[in-house]
Image (cartoon, rainbow, N blue to C red):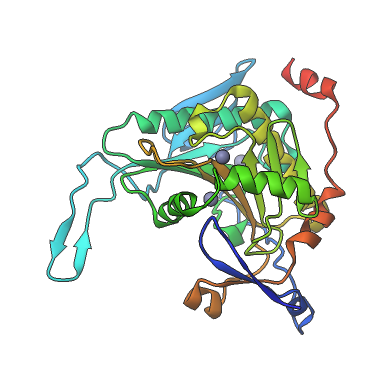
Amino acid sequence: MNTLRHDPLSGRWIAISSDRINRPNFSPIVSKDLSEEAPCPFCPGNEEATPPALETYHEDGRWLVRVIPNRFPAFSGQDSFVLQHHGPVFIDAPATGIHEVLILSPSHDTTWADFSTQQSDLVMFAIRDRIKAHQSTPGLRYSQAIVNAGREAGASLHHPHGQLMGIPIIPKELIEEQGNFARFSGDCLLCVAAAVEESAKERLVHAGEHVITAAPYWSGSPYELLIVPRHHEAHLSNSSKEELSAIGKEIRDGLKALKSHMGDIAYNVVFHSAPYRSTTLFHWHIHILPKLTTLAGFELGTGLYINIVTPEEAAENLRRFIVDEQPNDSQKAAS
Ligand SMILES: [Zn+2]
Ligand SMILES: [Zn+2]
Ligand SMILES: [Zn+2]
């Protein structure tokens, strides 16, 4: 039977309608190859095609992760954030801020699913370091880190990369999540959610020492994953190296399981960390959102999502591909 489930994080209702997967002409979106800009501006050797790096992470004289200014920034400049009213209903403000590209790897044909532990660590440390740099920039209030993979998920280049935006406003999605932490009647919404998903097991994809991955009860889209650090912390930038490393591996393993189960699919990875100076209750976390279906008129018109794959089925399918790392694996990668 179809059910409505409530997402306590976003406040949305979700219709779990698994019968709809059997309707005629349904097939999940398979990622198409992106047309290639030649030569690829993100490949080693072509560094001069991009603005100079803001930060690089090296090993043996070659870079492994590189952060550069976006050539086509949505947010730029340091003008003060002042609202301008134009008549009774029109308001605007300068889109000031920082827009950076995070080149996740020197290898053109890889994704985070294929990364070594060392590569995944460096990506997480780069995200932390850039958020810290944004935090010390006057006028900015929030950093959004994302990874878009595949054309359907909004990527414009094949080479694995993410984006980091430091912006002068707190976006609606964060305001909603913060409000829902405040409204939750228990201690912390995500500490409680992680604990109950761990004990229920049926939607659990992996439970590690530092982090839990689940296909959450309220999944709004097929194979959506929620990654929650066990340690209660509002800000990604306050997490220890050890935690960040564990979380990076969890992202890697989640993406690897998705790829093993469904092949090359498009997806978005979204990092939600508290606004810089926010002191209200929050617990930072990551959403992995595979792009297997398209939001249609009903979703866009109502904000109520229809999900055709139950999270219980998604978790069961993905768990088969999660292999717990042997302790000496990480030593090997670190040496
Ligand atoms: Zn490339
Ligand atoms: Zn918490
Ligand atoms: Zn979130």
167 lies left or right of 28? left
Where residue 212 appears, as percent x and y from the top left, is 70, 41
Rendered view: 152 above or below 190 = below
Work out whether residue 225 can be spotted.
yes
Q: Is residue 119 above or below residue 20?
A: above
Quadrant (top left/top right/bottom left/bottom right) for the N terminus: bottom right
Q: Position of residue 46 (x, y in %)?
A: 54, 34
Image side of residue 209 versus residue 191, left or right: right
Q: Is residue 284 left or right of residue 275?
A: right
Query: Which residue is located at x 68 percent, y 41 percent?
Result: 251
Residue positioned 79% across, 79% down in the render: 22
Query: Quick one: 10 or 297, which is closer to the camera?
Result: 10
Extreme-left residue of the structure? 87
Residue 309's image quarter? bottom right
Q: How many marks?
A: 0
Task: Provide residue 269's location: percent of width, then percent of height.
Answer: 59, 48
Front-most of residues 131 and 159:
131
Please say whether residue 109 is visible from this viewpoint: no
Q: Residue furthest front?
A: 185
In the rendered image, the vertical position of residue 201 relative to residue 31, given as above or below: above
Q: Nearer the viewer, residue 220 or 159?
A: 220
The picture places residue 300, in percent across and down from the top left corner, at: 50, 74
Residue at the spot x=34%, y=47% of the render?
75
Q: What residue is drawn where x is 65% and y is 69%?
A: 293
Ligand 1's quadrant: top right
| Relative height, residue 47 to residue 58 (above, below) | below
Task: Tell me the quarter of the image containing the C terminus.
Answer: top right
Q: Residue 140 or 333: which is nearer the viewer?
A: 140
